[in-house]
Amino acid sequence: MMNPMTNASRKSSLQQQIDENLKRVYEETLKEEVPDRFVQLLEQLKAKEREK
Amino acid sequence: MNDAPGAADPREEILTHLPALRAFAISLTRNPSQADDLVQDTIVKAWSNIDKFTVGTDLRAWLFTILRNTFFSDRRKKKREVADPDGLHAQSMFDKPHHDGRLAFADFTRAFYELSDEHREVLILVGANGYSCEEAAEMMGVAVGTVKSRTSRARNRLAQLLGMEPGEDVLGGDSGATLAVLSRSGTQAA
C-alpha cells in the first residue's frame, strides 16, 4: 500500500461523509414547519377522549 | 401541561416528535402529501394503541416503528412502485460530483432518493438518527445482522450512485481502494 492511510480510516472517512450528508438530508426536512393539521388532529383526539 | 396524578400521559409527548416523524415519512415516501397521510395514520394508531407503549422506553422509536410498519404494509397492499408524478426525486441523470473531494449535497440528495425503500429506511435510522443496529433491528423487525449488512450495502449503493466507482478519485485519496474495502466488508456481513 502506497497510501499512508489505513483501509479502516479511509473506510470510516467515506462513511463519515455519507452519514454527515444523510444527517443533512434528514435535517432539511426536520426544519420544515409541522402542518397545523397534525396539531389539530391531536387536539381532536384529546377532545374526543374527554367526552367519554 | 397538567401534572396528572401518577405518570403523565405519554401521548402529550407525541407533538414534540412530529418533525422527526414527518422527516422519516418524507424519506420513505419521497412525496410530501403521501408523507403527511402516513404521519396522520401513525398519530391515530399511536393514540389508540398507547397502552402497548412501555412507559420509560423511547417513544420516538415506538412511533417510528408504527410509521415504518404502516408504510411497508401499505406498500404491500398497493403492490405498486412508489409513484412520483412530479419526478422530483426520480431524476436518474445527474451531474457527477465535483472533483474537489467533497460530496455535492444536491447530488447526494438525488442519489439518496434513488435508493430502495429498505435502503433509505436503514440509512435514516442508523446513519441520520444514530440508532444502534440493535435498536434499528427492533424497529424494523429483522435480525441485527440484517441491519448491519443492509446498512453496508446501502452505503455502497449510495457511493456507486454518486459515481464513486473504483479508480475514481472523487473523495480525494484512493477511493477505489476504499470501495473495495467497503464491498468486502459488505460481503462478509451479509
Image (spheres, rainbow, N blue to C red):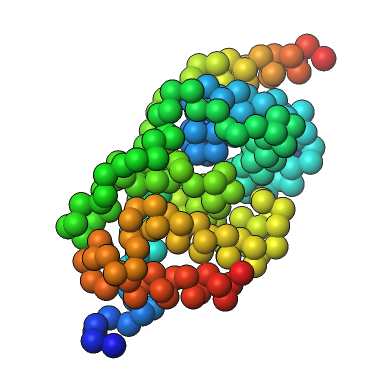
Q: Position of residue A48 (x, y in %)?
A: 74, 14
Residue B10 seen by the camera: no
Quarter where residue A44 is shown: top right
Q: Quadrant of the C terminus of chain A?
A: top right
Looking at the image, which residue is at 51% across and 64% down? Answer: B152
Front in this rendered view, residue B30 or B99? B99
Residue reaching furthest to the bottom:
A1
Q: Position of residue A47 (x, y in %)?
A: 69, 14
Quarter where residue B35 is shown: top right
Front in this rendered view, residue B37 or B14? B37
Q: Position of residue A19 (x, y in %)?
A: 40, 56
For residue B99, side relative to residue B165 (left or right): left
Question: Would you place residue A43 above or below residue B184 in this image?
Answer: above
Looking at the image, which residue is at 72% across and 37% down? Answer: B76
Looking at the image, which residue is at 28% across and 88% down? Answer: A1
For residue A40, side relative to residue B155 (left or right): right
Q: Position of residue B77 (x, y in %)?
A: 74, 32
Residue B96 seen by the camera: yes
